[in-house]
Image (spheres, rainbow, N blue to C red):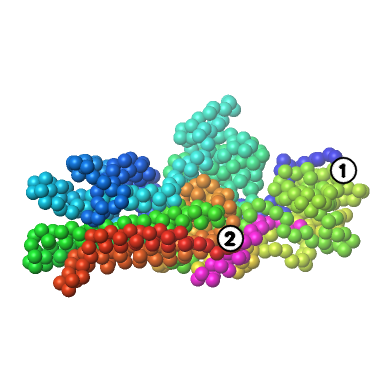
Amino acid sequence: MKLKTKEKNHDHQHHDQHHHANHEQHEGHRHTNHHEEHDHHNHEGGHEHHHHHGNFKEILLKSLPLGIPILILSPMMGVTLPFQFTFPYSDILVVILSTILLVYGGKPFYQGALDEFKQKAPGMMALITLGVSVSYVYSVYAVIAYYLTGEHVMDFFFEFASLILIMLLGHWIEMKAVGDAGDAQQSLAELLPKDAHVVLEDDSIETRSISELQVGDVVRVQAGENIPADGKIVRGESRVNEALLTGESKPIEKQKGDEAIGGSTNGEGVLYIEVKETGDKSFISQVQTLISQANNQPSRAENMASKVAGWLFYIAVIAAIIAYLVWIFVADIETAVLFTVTTLVIACPHALGLAIPLVVARSTSLGASRGLLVKNREALELAKKADIMVLDKTGTLTTGEFKVLDVGVVNDQYSVDEITAIMAGLEGGSSHPIAQSIVKHAEEKSIKAVNFDEMEVISGSGIEGRANGKHYRLISQKAYGKDLMIEIPKGATLSVLIEDDKAIGSVALGDELKESSKELVEALKSYGIEPLMATGDNETAAQGVAEELGINYRASQSPQDKYNLIEQLKNEGKTVIMVGDGVNDAPSLALADVGVAVGAGTQVALDSADVVLTQSDPGDIESFIELANKTTRKMNENLLWGAGYNFIAIPLAAGVLAPIGISISPAVGAILMSLSTVIVAINAMLLKLDKK
């Protein structure tokens, strides 16, 4: 077999008119979306919790040797439990251990409470700090009073230590469940190679750091390398994969005069690129700026646990003040202080502190079994309230691979298999994605390719060759110039197989829908969530997929366009979920109320998202929505159980019903507290997902 080429690349981009138009669409993706430049600082995003106040696992493990002896040596609200004992001056040891525990184990809660008071929104941390402080101070007073007067005064060291340990445990469980968010900025920077091969005037090559590149430098990019900077090709031809940057589903033919985006991957040719943009004006830098802007947006999650804790904080403080003022008149100062302290200690949210973390841990475990990695708890709450889901096309709803969608027979003397065999033989010598997809299709169907004697690339239209004494051409529909009167999938590229100047068959190629995409759209509609496709791909390809799915769409969307779309929807008061997999999706994933990254995509997208679909299956999005609904319901149930105890116990502890002989003794308070904690733990474990 002899392969003659009239040009270096088998130019199938002209098989259909929209191919070249697609490539021109990307002019808008590169530098037309300039916006105000911002400093690229590391901002603390709106999704952060109090976990930045320390490593809760480490603090918990180091606090246990302090807390456990306190629990063993101190009665629970005056009641000595079977495992407890005392010895002479054990109460002094308890005071020393409690002081160290307060300083070390209590530190993150005091820091958190300080933040809450600065924001004028006391919540969980303020409530914990209130209970810890009051129980510690009063208990130290109780010990001192005993040694000064010899009279036994009930202390709350048990409640003090158990509250700190349980709260550290709850925060560690939640932190372990959601994991650490990745750094999208860093992952984005890693798309660019560290060094560039700069061509000097004498054609020699000098390796420089990309930070040293200047506008006007010419860099050489070998096959398989990532392009180091935005620029214009001055020599060479190749196909460049820009899918993860722009959303274009097919590698793009590039030749002299075409633009190249830094971070995209060169195919099989060698390219010489003149650098046109560096620093803040480059494509990747602009995406970094958008991500930074998105991370500065405040979260719209309400965090019900903190809100309930805030209510309890005010109720406890008000009830304690009223109790003190009433009892100091009704009885004496000692009785008033006891009722006041009991009220504040009873408000300690043991169950409330575990209510959410236990559900999150269970939810995260269930999600992982379905291929869902939930990195941000607030995503579950917000997803339940979602109005609209913006979906990327390439790699999310579609496979992202160029595939044979349909093989047609125009001449009834041939079968589909025979047409496929001829096309596979004709394309057998080409490395072009279209050619490879035809060859792969034949292999999957176990069809043996026809052996061609010679083949030749036809500039701008296709390929031709001879086999079994006959002349065959596989060319674009545009080059053929006649309508075959056959139906082809929307957005597909059609090539025509011609034998001795007569059409005998056709092949439609395109990006194929994932099997679960249609089911996902139906599921979203059943949940009352509007699906909207936003893709960097061209109008024709986008329209085809959108019509097949029966959804609205936006085509030729740059990262800035997608970002603006999400911003517009949020400004309209809608809660937005964004699903994507590429660099062009990263800013939108960060800006959306909930960002869902498809696991097969870029690290940048994974780092920017709140939820990762590890199996890259759109059907898992439905599982996430179900998980969000059921998890939020369990959270609310646990908050009701956890806070319900406090709402009832606080007034009783304050002695509201004492005049008629009804009051809550410390022992009863301890039992209720423990029972409430057990109930929220059991309820969390009852969280389940429907079988797929």
In the image, 269: left or right of 53?
Answer: right
Horizontal and vertical percent position of residue 218: 55, 35
Res. 567 visible in picture:
no
In this figure, what is the number of numbered marks? 2
* The one of 241 and 605 positioned closer to us in this rendering: 605
Check disc 1 and report its element: helix, strand or loop: loop
Residue with the mark numbered 1: 453
- Say which residue appears at 63% left-offset and 55% top-offset: 399
- Label 2: few (<14), some (14–19) or many (≥20) C-alpha neighbours in 10 Å: many
Residue with the mark numbered 2: 619
Check disc 2 and report its element: helix, strand or loop: helix
Q: Check the image and report above or below for 146 versus 209.
A: below
Horizontal and vertical percent position of residue 509: 71, 56
- Say which residue appears at 90% left-offset and 50% top-offset: 470
Q: What stretch is highlighted in magenta?
A: 507-528
Amino acid on which the number 2 mark rests in the picture: Gly
Quarter the C terminus occupies: bottom right
Q: How far separated are the C-alphas under marks 2 and 1? A: 47 Å
* The one of 399 and 368 positioned closer to us in this rendering: 368
Mark 2 or mark 1: name the one nearer the start of the chain.
1
- Say which residue appears at 78% left-offset and 64% top-offset: 484
560 drawn magenta: no
Quarter the N terminus occupies: top right
